[in-house]
Amino acid sequence: MFVYVNFDPDFVAEYLDETAPLDPTVQYLVAHPDQRIVHDGLVISEREKKCHPYYDWHDRNSETHYRLVGQMCPALAMHAGVALHRTRKAGAYDRGEIEQFGILYRHIERALAIGFRLGALGAAQQCTMEILDRNPAGIVLLDARKQLVYLNSSAEALCSSNDGIELTGKGIALTHSRSNGRLQCLITEVLSKPGSPHTFRGGGMAALRPSGKRPYAILVTPVGERYPGLTPLRPAVCILIRDPEHGVLLPVERLREVFGLTGAEARLAVLLAAGTDLRSAAERLHITYGTARTRLAEIFHKTSTRRQAELVKVLLTTTNLG
């Protein structure tokens, strides 16, 4: 980005396209990235200016002749700064003016650093939102007051389908009263029980639908409890919503790669993540309930989990980003 004031646009365009590489001050700044304040008197004498091709071009196209520059490097291979120009008639910058500029530039430097940091945070947030939006599961984030903070495109589609999920002024609700009661209890549990990041809170549930289709599988889990002071987004609760009518949520091969599950274990894990209870999953896989329990115990071991709700949380949040 190059912003200028009181310069002819054509002059600036020609400078950027053709003559900037010839500018001795630019060459000096690149060679001395740690020097905060530079004036052309440090770089080139008045006698040298008279026979220098850059100043020959500059004096023919601009009234300015002297320059005072403050620079900073907010990141590797990135330069930022501000330059003051004055005419030949105004004369070169004297020592007192350079010192005054140094005092002012400390504030400019701080503003540039803050701007760069905010830009970096904004880019990181945008990247995170894009990843969440590509998740086929519905993702809803609530703050500590149960107010909606974010929902991805999958969650928007679920809410717009008018099949049991709705957004209200109080957050998210289910149209089936008993299912909604269970959901609100899980949200309250997450918010009312502070714990360490390694302590699992929340749980899973099935939500009945007015259409009579298979129930939604819902997981409610905490997000985090510490945020930067100047962020407007402070999610406290994450709600993952899976619609079993929309196919398998997790690919078997990904589960095998990430957790080292066998094919049989991965197929069972997929059904559990989709909201199927263990007994029904055993019937669909044509295995006994005892065999399913044995495989589930091995899945718990390989995923470092102890409960089915905790397992579903790990499976969804670890492998389902695409």
Image (cartoon, rainbow, N blue to C red):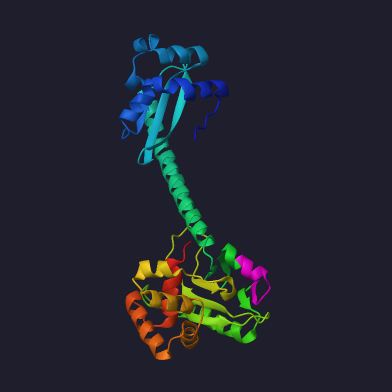
Foreground pick, 276 / 220: 276
Foreground pick, 314 / 245: 245
| Number of numbered markers | 0
Farthest residue toward the front?
A: 286
Foreground pick, 311 / 28: 311
* Residue 17, placed above or below residue 144: above
Query: Where on the picture, by quarter, is residue 253?
Result: bottom left
* Residue 104, placed above or below residue 234: above
Foreground pick, 290 / 10: 290
On the image, the x and y values in percent for residue 274 come to 51, 76
- Residue 260 in magenta stretch: no
On the image, the x and y values in percent for residue 228 come to 44, 60
Question: Residue placed at 44% from the left, 63% from the top?
Answer: 227
- Res. 255 visible in picture: yes
Q: Which residues are magenta?
A: 156-169
On the image, the x and y values in percent for residue 234 come to 50, 65
Question: Residue placed at 38% from the left, 9% from the top?
Answer: 51
* In the image: residue 101, left or right of residue 13: left
- Residue 161 in magenta stretch: yes
- Res. 224 visible in picture: no
* Residue 120, placed above or below residue 243: above
* Residue 239, placed above or below residue 8: below
Question: Residue placed at 52% from the left, 15% from the top?
Answer: 61
* In the image: residue 74, left or right of residue 128: left
On the image, the x and y values in percent for residue 108 come to 44, 39
Question: Residue placed at 47% from the left, 63% from the top?
Answer: 321
